[in-house]
Amino acid sequence: MATARLFGSSIKRREDPRFITGKGNYVADIKRPDMAMGVFLRSPHAHALIESIDIKAAAASMLARCADKDKFFPLIETLFQMQRTWAVEKPIPPLLAIAKQAGFTEQSFNECLANQQILDGLKETQNRAAQKFNVNSTPTFFINGKMFRGTLTPEELDKQVAPYLKG
């Protein structure tokens, strides 16, 4: 199976025209003392109940956690862009092809997917989110401790975040 080369090559974005045209703001560009990083996990299911971890999604998440630190976010983005190629009946070949672009060998790929500690960590994170924070659906956002369930437009998200950004 041929996989397009994604690491080290530019990819034309079809979404988010305001970011492409330079009219968007990126939180990652803002550096503040004691600033926390937020991570967005996309789901193919809008307003879905979370009942378990999909094994294919778990494998993709495990690979990101095994990747070199500087490859984590590029690999996550690539996995989302290429989700239709690996969220299939036999995900290993396309996941391996993507992982190789992030510097994995077949051996390191297999070792990562066999790492029970990483899988247990994913399950623990899901359980903690459900039990401690009452996260049981997607999307769920937390902004300064306040929970928002359901989709937030960029304008709604900006309205909620803006009061906490000084300067």
Image: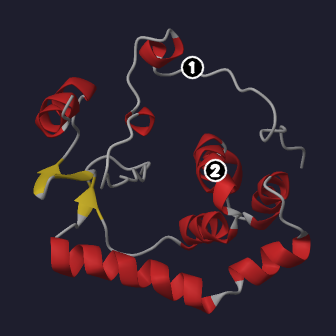
Three-letter residue code for mark 1: Arg
Left or right, 45 with reference to 96? left
Residue depicted at x 18% and y 79%: 132
Q: Residues within 10 Å of mark 1 (few under 14, many from 20)?
A: few
Left or right, 133 with reference to 115? left
Coloration of the structure image: secondary structure
Q: Earlier in the sequence, mark 2 or mark 1?
A: 1
Instruction: Tell me the element at label 2.
Output: helix
Instruction: Report, in whole angstroms, how far the alpha carbon at label 2 lies from the one at label 1.
Output: 16 Å
Residue depicted at x 89% and y 49%: 1
Task: Determine which quarter of the picture holds residue 50.
Answer: bottom left
Residue 87 seen in the figure: no
Q: Identify the disc placed on residue 79.
A: 2
Q: Residue 150: percent from the left, percent from the top? A: 19, 45
Q: Residue 116: percent from the left, percent from the top? A: 61, 91
Three-letter residue code for mark 2: Leu
Left or right, 49 with reference to 106? left
Q: Identify the disc placed on residue 14.
A: 1
Residue 36 seen in the figure: yes
Q: Is residue 150 above or below residue 107?
A: above
Q: Is residue 132 above or below residue 103?
A: below
Q: Residues within 10 Å of mark 2 (few under 14, many from 20)?
A: many
Name the foreground residue: 66 vs 43. Answer: 66
Task: Locate the C terminus by quadrant.
Answer: top left
Name the foreground residue: 4 vs 117. Answer: 117
